[in-house]
Amino acid sequence: VDGVTTLSRADASRPDIILLSLADPEPGFLAPLANLRRAFPVVPILALTATCMPEQDRAVLASGAQCVLNRAASRQELLQALRSVRPL
């Protein structure tokens, strides 16, 4: 899904949390995240990435995500990450 569709879906649903799967690092891959952060400044964002690169994770966090998790994470890791950004 492209960034415009992502933003319009989030706007329509008024999320409590955003789970965003980011594209592989390429120019502009952080734009959807930055747009979501501007549109929803207080909604926690958990970003999923395909790679484990510290410099990419830092860029994702700097762009507005509260947490970065690899897509290969276990169910338990995902639940723990979700709870860390949005406690029950």
Image (spheres, helix red, strand yellow):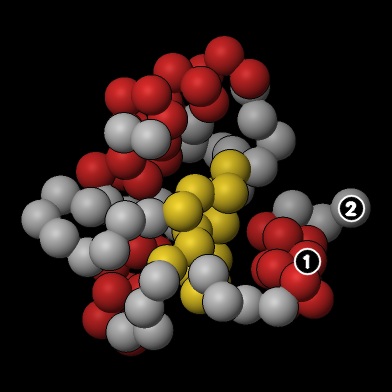
The residue lying toward the viewer, choosing from 2 and 37, is 2
Question: Compared to 55, does 28 lie above or below?
Answer: above
Residue 77 x, y percent position in the rendering: 72, 77
Pointer 1 with pointer 2, Cβ within 8 A: no
**From the viewer's perspective, is residue 84 above or below residue 87?**
below
State whether residue 54 is above or below residue 39: below
Label 1 CA crowd tier, 10 Å (few <14, some 14–19, many 20+): few
Mark 1 or mark 2: name the one nearer the start of the chain. 1
Tell me which corner region of the image, top left, top right, bottom left or bottom right, holds residue 2.
top left
As drawn, the residue found furthest toward the top would be 12
Q: Give left or right: position of 35 versus 20.
A: left
Asked if residue 53 can be seen in this view, the reply is yes
Three-letter amino acid code at the position of disc 2:
Leu
Q: Residue at x 22, y 65 (%)?
A: 25
Q: Nearer the viewer, mark 1 or mark 2?
A: 1
The residue tagged 2 is 88
* Disc 1 to disc 2, C-alpha distance: 11 Å
- How packed mark 2 is, by other alpha carbons closer than 10 Å (few <14, some 14-19, many 20 or more), is few
Q: Which residue is mark 1?
A: 79
For the point 38% across and 35% down, the residue is 1
- Specify whether residue 62 is in view: no
- Residue 35 location, x and y as percent? 32, 35
Residue sitting at x 42%, y 67%: 49
> Is 76 or 42 nearer to us in this picture?
76
Q: In this rendering, is residue 28 above or below 7? A: below
User: The disc labelled 1 sits on which kind of residue?
Assistant: Leu
Asked if residue 47 lies left or right of residue 19, the reply is: left
Residue 40 is left or right of residue 26, and the answer is right
Question: At numbered mark 1, what does the secondary structure look like: helix, strand or loop?
Answer: helix
